[in-house]
Amino acid sequence: MEKVVVLTGAGMSADSGLKTFRDSDGLWEGYDIEDVATPQAWEKDKQLVLDFYNDRRVQSYSVEPNKGHEAIARLEDKYDVTIITQNVDKLHERAGSTHVLHLHGQLSKVRSERDSSLVYDIGGDTIKLGDTADDGAQLRPHVVWFGEPVPNMNKAAEIVPRADILIVIGTSLVVYPAAGLVDLTSGDISKYIIDPSKPELSDYSGWKHIQRRSAVGTPELVEELLSNSN
């Protein structure tokens, strides 16, 4: 069974109605990223950061997986599929995908601000000041903020080179270290990019660009791959 690796970014979730900070010149739902998505923001105003992510968590459960998410899940019928996503929602899982690696954490989880190994799944619930982990420390969102290391990057770097087919959906390929993953594939595999605009690639040769939104281009490509598989 051929190995398909799918790298997804904000454009994937945007087609379900979730906004991203890149949509509006560095503002995310009206907030400056420096005020809500950095370790410094957390130290400065924990309440503001908690409120922001509580709202994002509720919002993420108010929308549904789009046709792109559903199409990727269908690929598992005939391919060995692993999704590596930069998104913090669970739309891939809710669509039925079973192998999803989250690079930037998950809104549905929280962790101790002191011990990153103490992680708890809270689904769509909210957290507030005074909610603590088993070590007595305040719970914080289980997301990777700007300036923090990406713990799952090593796992992703092991997965990508094993791909027979690489599909990149809804990401500008400009945010590192995640953008560097595409360079880990062998040169002779099939590579697809689904995005309305041309991605920022230093070497565009060998890629097939499907210039459509994620929810439109992904089902088209999946149908093609399923029909071509043995």
Image: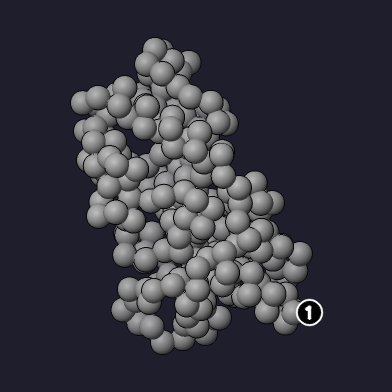
Q: Is residue 138 above or below residue 204?
A: above
Of residue 110 and residue 29, the one placed in the foreground of this image is: 29
**Which quadrant of the figure has residue 147?**
top left
Question: For the residue carrying disc 1, how many other residues have a C-alpha within 10 Å: few (<14), some (14-19), or many (20+)?
Answer: few
* Residue 187 can be seen, yes or no: no
Q: Position of residue 7 (x, y in %)?
A: 50, 62
Q: Which one is nearer the viewer's eye here, 169 or 39? A: 169
* Residue reaching furthest to the right: 230
Residue located 51% across and 44% down the image:
89
Which residue in the protein does label 1 denote? 230
How many numbered circles are shown?
Answer: 1
**Above or below — where is 84 with respect to 38?**
below
Q: Quadrant of the N terminus?
A: bottom right
Q: Amino acid at mark 1?
A: Asn
Q: Position of residue 171 (x, y in %)?
A: 42, 63
Q: Position of residue 48 (x, y in %)?
A: 30, 26
Q: Is residue 210 above or below residue 48?
A: below
Examine the image and state in which quarter residue 151 appears.
Answer: top left
Q: Quadrant of residue 138?
A: top left
Residue at (36, 66) in percent of width and height: 173
In the figure, is residue 6 to the left or right of 145?
right
Decide if residue 25 is on the left or right side of residue 117.
left
Please say whether residue 47 is visible from this viewpoint. Answer: yes
Q: Secondary structure at mark 1?
A: loop
